[in-house]
Image (spheres, rainbow, N blue to C red):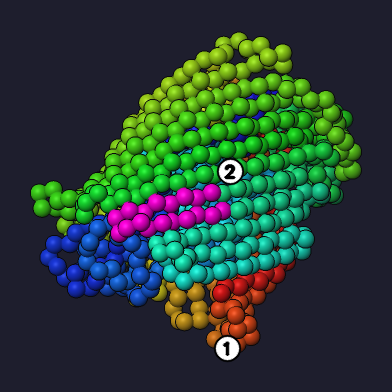
């Protein structure tokens, strides 16, 4: 049972990180005509500020499309007057993604596939949680339930192979540390595809997802409030405010949100509470100091899945289209034969009555940005993070063909986590043999202390499939594990413009990771092989180019590498587990194109990723080295507004991911697909706006996810599904509410066809499947003033 918890979503962190808000500044159209265009000086701006990038004069297409917006923030040093921000594009490619590069590059200027989902998009698409956001991105799937709060899959990789960052800071493997998170306090979600260790360090073999909280802005104070309620009796509320204070140079941002998200399974819900705030103080044109604080809390009663059941047992209650295949129970060893989901269990919760799933998190961050010279900028940030998490649940629901009942098993674990660290960047703009060049040198360090009391016994029982007596957890005996991790990294990232339209972009990261582990039994005595220490020194990087062949049309390619722990989770490594790092590399090429006066945009990428020395779960409980994992695929996204009322968008991703050289005693999984990796994922949407005195917009979105396996054995398939949402909103004129600048009422139907489908399968709990939510109705109201 302990092995089954080695990759369970929750635990601690390793520090790595990335943040920086090196925004690329806009220059006037006249400067765009100069024969020699320069990199802009680095702007002193709030860390992780999510404003649209300001195109440098050298980027002719961006300058040509620039439109008047708000004035820029305080500058590092004197330079040409900044007048405009870059116009937003349909795919948001003018946004800066700090988690993808510290050079202050926009999405289009980065030689990688990057998506930035803005707060406005989250609001319009009705994304309530970060899982919702991920599922709208190109080729990304997510667990989307309280038990798997942020279990992501993209480009053939899942869970701790994808780094989760908070304002650019990594706190640990996402399958341990990620929690369900409401989007209300977020300014943006950034998604970087493929090996990404250059920026976020160990653990980014499949990519990185960065959650960016809302930031202060310079200008008049703006307030916002929004509320929603749905047919499951879920409720959300949020209030935010930000702008300049009466103190010259002092800007603020404050947000508070509360939600109760009820699940479709009996007695399941998640309550979240999030308070965040930040102050920016511009002491002078060359110096800014800032500080931020955030408190997050979530409390849930979880649904851990619906058991696979023999078709022969369910009879007329067997369902088609949710799962297929045959299965021998990994938990009790009985042969289920062809399996199904029994329709009498759609809403059944097999968790114990006294279950709990709780987390409390506190962030403290602060730093400064100093212009040392017109071409030299120093930025530094210190941070502290603390978390308390606990789970007390029944987590296994395994049908037993001998007794025709559901065998259950309990599990308990808690985390006490403390992390402190610093990230310092030095940015230098210079000429190299007459060529414009920007170099960012980053030093980061952190120290993590992690204490993990966990279950030493696993109470269990058997209950009826249709009418289970849920009971209580029972006797709990605990033992303790600890992990202390220190991390230091030195990285260099450079952009050299060989011509006005062609740039070489590369970087190198040298990292040291030191781990001290201990484990004790119920009596407090050290287990065999403990304590032990281990250190790693991965070297990772990126080399690529961008070429703007014609204004708005950019080709790119890159070679990038990543590294992560072969046994999946650095915080739970034991002396008998694989202690080496895996290595990952990617070859990627593609094109990004914005056209038709910013009314249309599309992007395409093709990639080939290989990960060696892979850890995997053979049959659900056994740890194996799976040799290699190969992933090849293509991604296509586009958005267009052909006429003013109509907007169309869509994306599709195809990935061929498989294990190679995956042999073990008793069999081989070579050629099998990794769990939760569909070959095809597609999203599409359309909306039409009626320009009436009370403007109304109606829209529809659809999502298709292909077949997926629920374990490395590939004997059970979670069948492909297609779901759709419809919505309508009305913008209330200002004449109705004089004190409100914008007011919007929205009605939304999620899963409009009431499709029943499997959304996720945990390879360590392969006896059960997590079902997607049925049809729900939602009403929402939003106000800005």
Label 1: few (<14), some or many (≥20) within 10 Å? few
Describe the element under mark 1 as helix, strand or loop: loop
Looking at the rendered structure, the secondary structure element under dot 2 is strand
What mark, if any, has residue 692 been given in the picture?
1
Q: Is residue 633 above or below residue 333?
A: below
Mark 2, other Cα within 10 Å: few <14 / some 14–19 / many ≥20: some
Q: Nearer the viewer, residue 206 or 708?
A: 206
Rendered residue at 52%/34% (across/down): 419
Mark drawn on residue 362: 2
**Closer to us: mark 1 or mark 2?**
2
> Are dots 1 and 2 in contact, CB under 8 Å?
no
Query: Residue 629, can we see it?
Result: no
Is residue 604 left or right of 650 when viewed as pictured? Answer: left
Main SS of the magenta part reads strand
Image position, residue 301 (x, y; %): 76, 45
Whether the magenta-drawn stretch holds residue 192 is answered as no
Q: Position of residue 636 (x, y in %)?
A: 43, 58
Percent x, y of residue 626: 50, 27
Q: Residue furthest bottom?
A: 693
Quadrant position of the N terminus in the picture: top right
* Residue stretch in magenta: 276-293
Q: Is residue 570 visible?
A: yes
- Name the image quarter holding the C terminus: bottom right
* Residue in the image at 39% along x and 51% along y: 289
Quarter residue 457 falls in: top right
């Amino acid at each position: 049972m302990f092995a089954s918890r080695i990759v369970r979503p929750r635990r601690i962190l390793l520090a790595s990180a990335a943040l920086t808000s090196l925004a690329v500044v806009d220059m006037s159209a006249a400067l765009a005509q100069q024969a020699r265009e320069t990199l802009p000086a680095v702007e002193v701006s709030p860390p992780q500020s999510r404003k649209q990038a300001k195109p440098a004069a050298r980027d002719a297409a961006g300058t040509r499309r620039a439109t008047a917006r708000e004035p820029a923030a305080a500058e590092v040093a004197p330079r040409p007057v900044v007048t405009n921000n870059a116009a937003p594009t349909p795919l948001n490619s003018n946004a800066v993604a700090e988690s993808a590069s510290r050079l202050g590059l926009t999405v289009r200027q980065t030689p990688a596939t990057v998506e930035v989902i803005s707060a406005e998009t989250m609001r319009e698409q009705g994304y309530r949680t970060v899982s919702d956001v991920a599922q709208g991105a190109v080729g990304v799937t997510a667990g989307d339930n309280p038990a798997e709060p942020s279990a992501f899959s993209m480009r053939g990789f899942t869970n701790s192979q994808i780094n989760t960052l908070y304002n650019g800071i990594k706190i640990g493997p996402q399958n341990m540390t990620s929690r369900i998170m409401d989007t209300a306090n977020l300014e943006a979600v950034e998604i970087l595809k493929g090996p990404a260790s250059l920026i976020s360090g160990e653990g980014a073999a499949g990519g990185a997802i960065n959650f960016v909280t809302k930031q202060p802005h310079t200008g008049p104070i703006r307030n916002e409030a929004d509320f929603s309620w749905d047919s499951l009796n879920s409720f959300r509320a949020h209030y935010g405010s930000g702008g300049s204070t009466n103190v010259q140079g002092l800007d603020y941002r404050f947000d508070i949100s509360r939600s109760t998200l009820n699940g479709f399974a009996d007695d399941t819900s998640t309550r979240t509470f999030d308070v965040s705030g930040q102050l920016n103080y511009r002491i002078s044109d060359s110096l800014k100091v800032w500080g931020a604080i955030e408190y997050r809390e979530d409390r849930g009663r979880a649904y851990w899945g619906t058991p696979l059941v023999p078709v022969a047992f369910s009879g007329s209650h067997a369902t088609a289209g949710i799962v297929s295949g045959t299965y021998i129970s990994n938990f009790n060893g009985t042969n289920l034969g062809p399996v199904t989901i029994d329709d009498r269990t759609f809403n059944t919760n097999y968790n114990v009555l006294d279950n709990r799933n709780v987390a409390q998190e506190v962030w403290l961050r602060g730093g400064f940005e100093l212009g040392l010279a017109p071409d030299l900028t120093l930025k530094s940030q210190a941070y502290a993070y603390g978390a308390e998490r606990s789970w007390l649940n029944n987590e296994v629901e395994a049908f037993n063909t001998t007794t025709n009942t559901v065998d259950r098993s309990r599990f308990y674990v808690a985390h006490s986590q403390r992390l402190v660290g610093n990230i310092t960047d030095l940015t230098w703009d210079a000429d190299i043999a007459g060529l414009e060049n920007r170099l960012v040198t980053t030093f980061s360090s952190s120290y993590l202390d992690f204490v993990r009391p966990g279950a030493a016994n696993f109470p269990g029982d058997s209950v009826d499939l249709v009418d289970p007596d849920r009971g209580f957890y029972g006797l709990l005996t605990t033992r303790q594990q600890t992990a202390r991790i220190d991390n230091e990294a030195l990285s260099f990232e450079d952009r050299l413009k060989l011509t006005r339209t062609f740039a070489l972009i590369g970087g190198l990261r040298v990292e040291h990771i030191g781990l001290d582990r201990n484990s004790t039994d119920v009596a407090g005595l050290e287990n065999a092989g403990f304590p032990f220490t281990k250190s790693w020194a991965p070297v990772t990087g990126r080399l690529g180019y961008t070429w703007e062949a014609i204004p708005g049309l950019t080709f790119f390619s890159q070679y990038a590498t990543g590294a992560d722990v072969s046994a999946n989770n650095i915080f739970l490594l034991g002396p008998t587990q694989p202690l080496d790092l895996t290595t990952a590399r990617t070859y990627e090429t593609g094109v990004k194109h914005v056209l038709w006066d910013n009314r249309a945009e599309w992007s395409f990428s093709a990639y080939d990723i290989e990960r060696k020395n892979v850890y995997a779960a053979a049959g659900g409980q056994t740890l194996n080295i799976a040799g290699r994992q190969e992933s090849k695929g293509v991604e296509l996204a586009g958005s267009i507004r052909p006429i003013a009322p109509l907007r169309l968008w869509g994306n599709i991703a195809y990935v061929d991911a498989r294990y190679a050289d995956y042999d073990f005693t008793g069999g081989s999984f070579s050629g099998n697909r990794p769990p939760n990796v569909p070959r095809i994922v597609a999203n599409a949407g359309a909306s039409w706006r009626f320009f009436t005195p009370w403007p109304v917009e109606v829209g529809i979105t659809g999502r298709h996810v292909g077949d997926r396996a629920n374990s490395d054995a590939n004997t059970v398939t979670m069948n492909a599904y297609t779901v759709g949402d419809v919505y309508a909103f009305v913008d209330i004129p200002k004449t109705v509410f004089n004190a409100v600048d914008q007011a919007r009422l929205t009605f939304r139907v999620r899963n409009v066809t009431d499709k029943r489908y499997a959304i996720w399968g945990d390879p360590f709990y392969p006896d059960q499947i997590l079902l997607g939510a049925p049809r729900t109705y939602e009403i929402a109201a939003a106000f800005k003033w």
